[in-house]
Image (tube, rainbow, N blue to C red):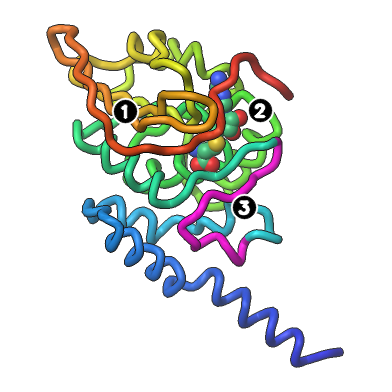
Amino acid sequence: MNRGMRLDAEAIGSGLTSQRVRDRLVERLRASGIEDERVLRAIGTVPRHLFVDEALAMRAYEDTALPIGHGQTISQPWVVAKMTEALLQTAPRKVLEIGTGSGYQAAVLAALGLEVHTVERIGELLRSARKRFRQIGLEVRSKHDDGYVGWAENAPFDAIMVTAGGAAVVDALLDQLSPGGALIAPVGSATSQELLRLVKHEDGRVERQMLAPVVFVPLLPGTID
Ligand code: SAH
């Protein structure tokens, strides 16, 4: 038995899961303009390395998007933080995410104590995400469906977050938003989008704010197994 190797593997393992590695990411996010302490604490708590393939776990605490299979990605931590910060501004309790992907963004929202609903069109990604929610012990309600239709049975939502880039804001999602609620979504072309925050005022007026230029994988219609 190669004892040295086993010790190395243990050292790497504990390095990945240690609070120190996550704390370093949190400090980096703080330095790049993320101010909401609740968001920073949630990112400091959720083990992002469990949301990527083991082969990529070493890179889980870099501030970068990573592949999760099926041509999809787990969003960059800064983007997750920025969107979460924007979502919290209207003090939501019940939220909807479109594009579960790895489940990381949903886990961050659940770690903030929100009632999280999430919809994913790729069945296999959703099954992996559900395993992770169970493993970490976070409650997230999820559905395998086309997010273009939202989740009417559970509407209205205090806030909705779309984590795939669309050509326009999806009207069905605006309809499922409570008065006073906010929709955060990347809107633009297939290669680049603007992160938008839309607030639906009590009188029905929709206020639009641009947050940052971003690059998301595309919002696609239909479902696949
Ligand atoms: N929030 C995710 C990011 C995943 S990438 C995370 O934290 O990992 C975007 C995801 O949106 C992909 O998994 C993609 O399959 C999904 N998606 C794209 N179009 C969709 C649609 N119409 N309905 C539901 N999910 C969709």
User: In what quadrant of the picture does the N terminus appear?
Assistant: bottom right
Picture coordinates of residue 56, whole percent (x, y)? 65, 59
For mark 3, give the secondary structure: loop
Q: Amino acid at mark 3?
A: Val
Question: Does residue 8 appear left or right of residue 75 in this picture?
Answer: right
Q: Amino acid at mark 1?
A: Leu
Relative to 26, say whether 164 is above or below.
above
Q: Nearer the viewer, mark 1 or mark 3?
A: 1
Residue plotted at (36% across, 25% down):
160
Badge 1 crowding class, 10 Å Cα cut-off, few under 14, some 14 to 19, many 20 or more, is many
Residues under numbered marks 2 and 3 in contact, where contact means CB atoms less than 8 Å apart: no
The residue lying toward the viewer, choosing from 163 and 47, is 163
Marks 2 and 3, how far apart at CA: 16 Å
The label on residue 122 is 2
Residue plotted at (22% across, 51% down):
36
The residue lying toward the viewer, choosing from 58 and 31, is 31
Q: Considering only order in the chain, which callout, 1 or 2, is on the residue closer to the N terminus?
A: 2
Relative to 170, say whether 33 is above or below.
below
Q: Considering only order in the chain, which callout, 3 or 1, is on the residue closer to the N terminus?
A: 3
Magenta-drawn stretch contains 68: yes
Residue plotted at (59% across, 50% down):
66
Residue plotted at (42% across, 38% down):
214
The label on residue 196 is 1
Whether residue 186 can be seen here: yes
The residue lying toward the viewer, choosing from 213 and 61, is 213
Badge 3 crowding class, 10 Å Cα cut-off, few under 14, some 14 to 19, many 20 or more, is many
The label on residue 52 is 3
Residues under numbered marks 2 and 1 in contact, where contact means CB atoms less than 8 Å apart: no
Q: Start and end of the magenta stretch?
A: 57-70
Marks 2 and 1, how far apart at CA: 25 Å
